[in-house]
Amino acid sequence: MSLTYTYIGHGTHALSVSGHRLLIDPFINGNPATTLTADDVQCDFILITHGHGDHVGDAVAIAQRTGAPCIANASICKWLEAKGAPKTQNLYFGGWQKFLFGRAKMTIAFHGSSLPDGTDGGNPGGYLIESNGKERIYFAGDTALFGDMALIGEEGLDLAVLPIGDHYTMGPDDALRAVKLLNPKHVVPTHYNTWPVVAQDGDAWGQRVTSETKSTPHVLLPGQSIDL
Ligand code: NI
Ligand code: MN
């Protein structure tokens, strides 16, 4: 197995799978949780869960510099192309698509998806990523709790990356219920402490995961990584 997850901060993540570098929701410039700039990051693929500015972020600039394709829903792909993204690949809910790193499937999310200029960004989503070595990683994106997380959990998850910030997404209580539905081997809390409105105690949440579920929590500071 060769899989490294890095919490860049807020809802921004990097995943290295079998030598391929994925960047998920590349909000770098203006992200209070990271000291990186959009010029620093290297990637081979950019995945976007929904249209909000704190998720689309610097996708176009990074795609132009690196040549990485942007993977998103069709509405967001169209918008990214209009803004100058060199390559896009759209996904629809429920269908696997193959990539060099393995395959990816867009999962449902309950949230909004308007793009920074007010354009409709289609439906918000999350991603289930399966490496060539069959490791499965679930990025929930921004979402409320939903019962069909149990179906995603049936896929067998090595890692789940969940929002716990409350206000815009699941808070700590619902994110704990999500862990019970998803039953991942490992779980990382995200999308919190970026701004006062999403202030949460990640360590306290991790302790609840340990005592109330079978999953192993990894409460990472921005910039920290785990190898699975
Ligand atoms: Ni959002
Ligand atoms: Mn967000």
Image (cartoon, grey):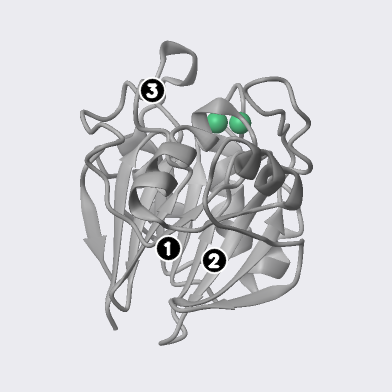
Look at the image and tell me in which quarter the N terminus lies: bottom left
Disc 1/disc 3 C-alpha distance (Å): 25 Å
The residue carrying pointer 3 sits among few (fewer than 14), some (14 to 19) or many (20 or more) residues within 10 Å by Cα, namely some
Q: Which residue was labeled with disc 2?
A: 183
The picture places residue 16, in percent across and down from the top left corner, at 31, 66
Residue 215: which numbered mark, if any? 1
Residue mark closest to the camera, 2 vs 3:
3
Front-most of residues 61 and 99: 61
As shown in the figure, which amino acid type bears the numbered disc 3? Thr
> For numbered disc 1, what is the local secondary structure?
loop
Q: Residue at x 41, y 87 (%)?
A: 133
Q: In the image shown, does 217 or 120 lie closer to the viewer?
A: 120
Q: Going from the N terminus, do you reach mark 1 or mark 3 first?
A: 3
Q: Which residue is mark 3?
A: 194
Looking at the image, which residue sits at the far bottom? Answer: 133
Residue 120 quadrant: top right
Q: Residue at x 41, y 25 (%)?
A: 200
Q: Tell me if 122 is positioned left or right of 32 in this view.
A: right
Which residue is depicted at the point 70% across and 52% down?
73
Relative to residue 120, is residue 102 depicted above or below? below
In the depicted view, which residue is nearer to us: 74 or 18?
Answer: 74
Name the residue: 35% across, 35% down.
Answer: 202
* Rendered-image quadrant of the C terminus: bottom left
Callouts 1 and 2 close, C-beta under 8 Å: yes
Query: Which residue is at the front of the view, 88 or 5?
Result: 88
Count of numbered marks: 3
* Closer to the eye: label 1 or 3: 3
Q: Position of residue 13 (x, y in %)?
A: 38, 48
Q: Can residue 50 be seen in this snapshot?
A: no
Element on which disc 3 rests: loop
User: Callout 2 environment at 10 Å: few (<14), some (14 to 19), or many (20+)?
Assistant: many
